[in-house]
């Protein structure tokens, strides 16, 4: 006969298992249940495919929260649907450095980031292979925020259209029928060009052009070598001419230096002769001045020489008058030379 199980033991075993399960959940969830949270909601335009509950919420690549709920709401006034994505932000993952008015609570701080710093949310892919998405927060969006209306007291962060939505929007604006028609027309035109033989003619012309180019290159190669030899000879002539000019310039430089030395010696010799010559010229000038002064004294008015010269001039004047009178008389009476004066 088997022994009946003890209910106390079974109850204790069940309670222990439940305790282990709760501890495992707390460990593997990184104790998220004990974190301080700020409830956020964002209405993303378009599809949120790839976004799931538990997805990460990142700010510039740093995980600061996780998605807690995704819903679909029908708005009768708009006759459309909205997709609110609820997620929590953990304030204890954001530190504050420096002084300032940071005594605000986390909700007020988050709201100020939205209104003053342009905090916005967008969907970003976690992996292109798995197709998983996350919520990415960033600052710097200009313009006032556009709110759609948060519920349950959550802070609403406006959404920014993701890259996927922009690409889908561009694809929706593209007409596939027009693209197919243009592609078909291009293929048809290409087929006609190939069938017309134009391509073959172009290929033949290209071959002929290549042949002509080859001949031209051969001719140029044949002419380049003689031209290079002539250039080498010309360069040699220029080198010899440069050597000759250099030698002549050296000799001319030597002669110039000798002439400069001779001029320097002549200048020194003239310097040696100038001083005595200057002294002699000064003495001669002094003697001349004295002679002129003496002559001026002799010829001064009232001097003996001046008186004698005046008397001599008077006598000469009287003699000249007598001779003139005699000449006049003889001109009138030439016979006086024979008979004498009567």
Image (cartoon, rainbow, N blue to C red):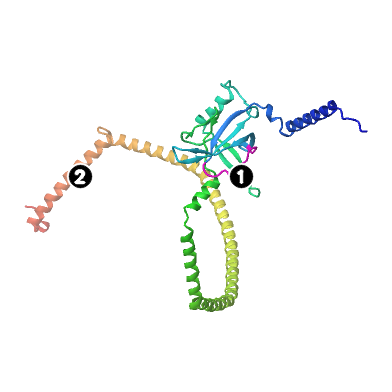
Instruction: Examine the image and state in which quarter residue 1 appears.
Output: top right
The earlier-in-sequence mark between 2 and 1 is 1
For this rendering, which residue is in front, 34 or 166?
34
Q: At 68% across and 26% down in the image, what residue appears?
A: 34
Q: Is residue 219 magenta?
A: no
Q: Whole-percent x and y of residue 236? A: 60, 69
Mark 1 — residue? 50
Mark 2 — residue? 316
Q: Whole-percent x and y of residue 80? A: 47, 41
Q: Whole-percent x and y of residue 86? A: 58, 34
Q: At 49% across and 76% down in the image, what residue appears?
A: 198
Callout 2 crowding tier (Cα within 10 Å): few <14, some 14–19, many ≥20: few
Q: What separation in Å lies between label 2 and label 1 (alpha carbons)?
A: 154 Å
> What is the residue that sits farthest to the right in this orientation?
1
Q: Which residues are magenta?
A: 45-56
Q: Look at discs 2 and 1 and give the one toward the viewer.
A: 1
Residue 66 is marked as none
For this rendering, which residue is in front, 82 or 135?
82
- Under tag 1, what secondary structure? loop
- Under tag 2, what secondary structure? helix
Q: Is 99 rendered above or below residue 275?
A: above
Q: Is residue 51 magenta?
A: yes
Q: At 75% across and 32% down in the image, what residue appears?
A: 27
């Amino acid at each position: 006969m088997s022994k009946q199980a003890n209910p106390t033991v079974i109850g204790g075993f069940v309670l222990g298992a439940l305790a282990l399960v709760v501890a495992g959940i707390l460990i593997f969830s990184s104790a998220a249940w004990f974190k301080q949270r700020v409830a956020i909601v964002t209405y993303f335009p378009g599809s949120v495919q790839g976004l799931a509950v538990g997805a990460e919420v990142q700010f510039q690549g740093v995980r600061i929260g996780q998605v807690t709920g995704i819903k679909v709401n029908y708005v009768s006034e708009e006759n459309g649907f909205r997709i609110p994505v609820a997620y929590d932000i953990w304030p204890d993952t954001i530190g504050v450095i420096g002084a300032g008015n940071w005594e605000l609570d986390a909700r007020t701080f988050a709201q100020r980031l939205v209104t003053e710093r342009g905090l916005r949310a967008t969907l970003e892919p976690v992996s292109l292979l798995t197709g998983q998405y996350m919520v990415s927060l960033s600052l710097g969006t200009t313009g006032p925020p556009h709110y759609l209306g948060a519920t349950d007291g959550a802070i609403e962060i406006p959404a920014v259209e993701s890259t996927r939505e922009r690409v889908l929007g561009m694809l929706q604006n593209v007409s596939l029928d027009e693209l197919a028609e243009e592609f078909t027309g291009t293929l048809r035109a290409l087929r006609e060009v190939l069938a017309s033989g134009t391509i073959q003619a172009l290929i033949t012309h290209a071959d002929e052009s290549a042949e002509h180019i080859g001949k031209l290159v051969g001719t140029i190669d044949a002419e380049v070598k003689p031209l290079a030899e002539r250039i080498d000879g010309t360069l040699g002539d220029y080198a010899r001419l440069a050597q000759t000019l250099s030698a002549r310039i050296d000799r001319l430089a030597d002669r110039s230096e000798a002439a400069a030395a001779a001029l320097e010696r002549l200048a020194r010799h003239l310097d040696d002769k100038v001083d005595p010559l200057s002294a002699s010229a000064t003495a001669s000038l002094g003697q001349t001045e004295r002679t002129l002064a003496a002559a001026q004294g002799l010829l001064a008015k009232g001097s003996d020489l001046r008186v004698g010269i005046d008397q001599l001039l008077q006598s000469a004047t009287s003699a000249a008058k007598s001779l003139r009178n005699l000449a006049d008389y003889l001109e009138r009476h030439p016979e006086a030379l024979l008979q004498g004066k009567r």
